Amino acid sequence: MAKLSLRRVRKRFGEHEVCKGIDLDVAEGEMVCLIGASGSGKSTLLRCMNLLEPIDDGVIWLDGTDISEPGLDPQPVRQQIGIVFQSYNLFPHMTAAENVMLAPRRVRRLSREELRPRVAKLFSRFGLGDRMEHYPDQLSGGQQQRVAIIRALAMEPQIMLFDEITSALDPELVGEVLDVLRDLRKQGMTMVLATHEMGFARELADKICFLDAGRILEQGPPDVLFASPREPRTKAFLSRVL
Amino acid sequence: MSETPLRNNPVEHPASTPTRREVYEAGVRRRSNRIALISTVSVLLAIVVLVPLAPGWEAVQRAFFNGRVFAATFPGLLEAFFLNVMIFAWSAPLIAISGLAIALCRDTRAPALFPLRLFGIAYTDIFRGLPVVLVIYIVGFGIPGLGLPRPWNSPYIWGTLALVLVYSAYVAEVIRSGIDSIHQSQRSAAASLGLSDQDTMRFVVLPQAIRNVVPANMNLFIALQKDVALLSFIGPVEIFRQAGVYKSLYANFTPYVGAALIFLALTIPATRYADYLMNKQNRARS
């Protein structure tokens, strides 16, 4: 059984339908990459998966439980599905460590003393051991994005969603963030990424989904999809970005 | 190495000698400073020379700028001003608290709390729509008229309450604009971590919102300091009323000028400080 399953998922903003019936399965420990042009619905699809956006139609199952039922309390679901955003969205008035500890403190009711050692371990694991007491504006983009990843991981989610997390970074900082994803991949984290990093997707993904105008036009393992795409639109997109 | 001067090569230029650009800009700066100085001095000179030529100047000087009356009344005015400071000191925290509470009322989204939201909207609309002095009259004369026992019939208490009522509405609107200024992505980030709406407001939105509106609220509190003088209409002998008493006593307007100076001594530094904070914030944002 898939860890996360989507069937016929539809989402519209006003007149504009962004997701036009998406079917997707993410298996435990799998890394799925969503590729496609800007506006093809990648970000919206990710935001639907952890219920930041309520879907208009269709079903989403997490471990076989329907989490898309209207009226369901989204908070427990969001604790199991972490998301990292393109623009980091750190809380600017808190230190890096406070950013990370806020949700575990308030939601899991853990004390700072209990959290400290675990958080410190996460920071040093991602090369930020000496940045815990810094404020976000004292950190580089790459460091901020790594803090944002740690913040999501601190809730110990079962699935991590990444919404173009390297798109706002200077090219020389992209590598340090991708290294974090490699590390997570090795740990067996289930991940869904919206990304423009084709090389990275090709190297690490189990499955690539090409989104076009709100639909998954084509999906498959990276070597198949990148080497011999079936659809002309996929071909055209790949020839533009590769 | 060649002996050619490097004047035209900006990269090789040592930091100690100014570049052509810096020399030019320094010249422009000197020139505009000179012009500003000359024009200011000539305007001041014109005032000092021309105003005393006006036919009523002698009378005005006697009535408003009388040194003897000033010296006699200034200590009494300062003492009366202490009451203004007291009224300000205990109304300001109340205004901050109730302004925040009303702003939060207006921001509630839960249907069960709709009455609160309605209250918040009605409250800010009503009290921002009324002249302060009218509220002071209605509350300050109306409530003691209920025949409450001492000390609860004091216009000092109810007049201050009137100020709190009016200024809370303004502070609430300023705080609400601060809440609105926090980008939706901050709420998304908090929600994605599983934080409740209340925790998101308390730990993520409000701390940033309140910091953003400190300068705007400073301006409101400066205005409040001045509006404390309106309480004089219903009784408390604060500085404005005390100046009126002295005016009648000496048949001279100088006490009002004294009172004005005392107000300015407090409000000008406060205004400068608020501007400084505002500029700092604008710089930080750009």
Image (tube, rainbow, N blue to C red):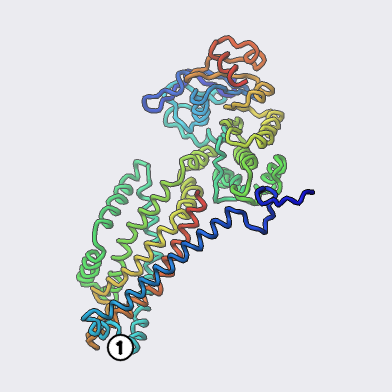
Does the rendering let one see residue A66? no
Q: Mark 1: which amino acid?
A: Val
Pointer 1 local density, CA inside 10 Å: few below 14, some 14–19, many at least 20? many
Between B86 and A63, the residue placed more toward the observer is: B86
Between B3 and B106, the residue placed more toward the observer is: B3
How many marks can you see? Answer: 1
Point out residue A16 in the picture as x, y percentages from the top left corner: 40, 24
In screen coordinates, is B43 left or right of A171?
Answer: left
Q: Residue at x 45, y 54 (%)?
A: B210
Point out residue A231 in the picture as x, y percentages from the top left corner: 55, 10
Tell me if residue A50 comes above or below residue B139 in the rendering: above
Between A92 and B200, the residue placed more toward the observer is: A92
Q: Quadrant of residue B96?
A: bottom left
Q: Residue at x 58, y 56 (%)?
A: B22
Tell me if residue B35 comes above or below residue A228 in the rendering: below
Q: Residue furthest right?
A: B1
Between B265 and B216, the residue placed more toward the observer is: B265
Does the rendering let one see residue B97? yes
Tell me if residue A56 comes above or below residue A107 in the rendering: above
Indicate the chain on which mark 1 is placed: B
Q: Which residue is mark 1?
A: B69
Point out residue B161 in the picture as x, y percentages from the top left corner: 31, 66
Point out residue B48 in the picture as x, y percentages from the top left corner: 33, 78
Tell me if residue A131 comes above or below residue B18 in the rendering: above
Q: Quadrant of residue A57?
A: top left
Q: Secondary structure at mark 1?
A: helix
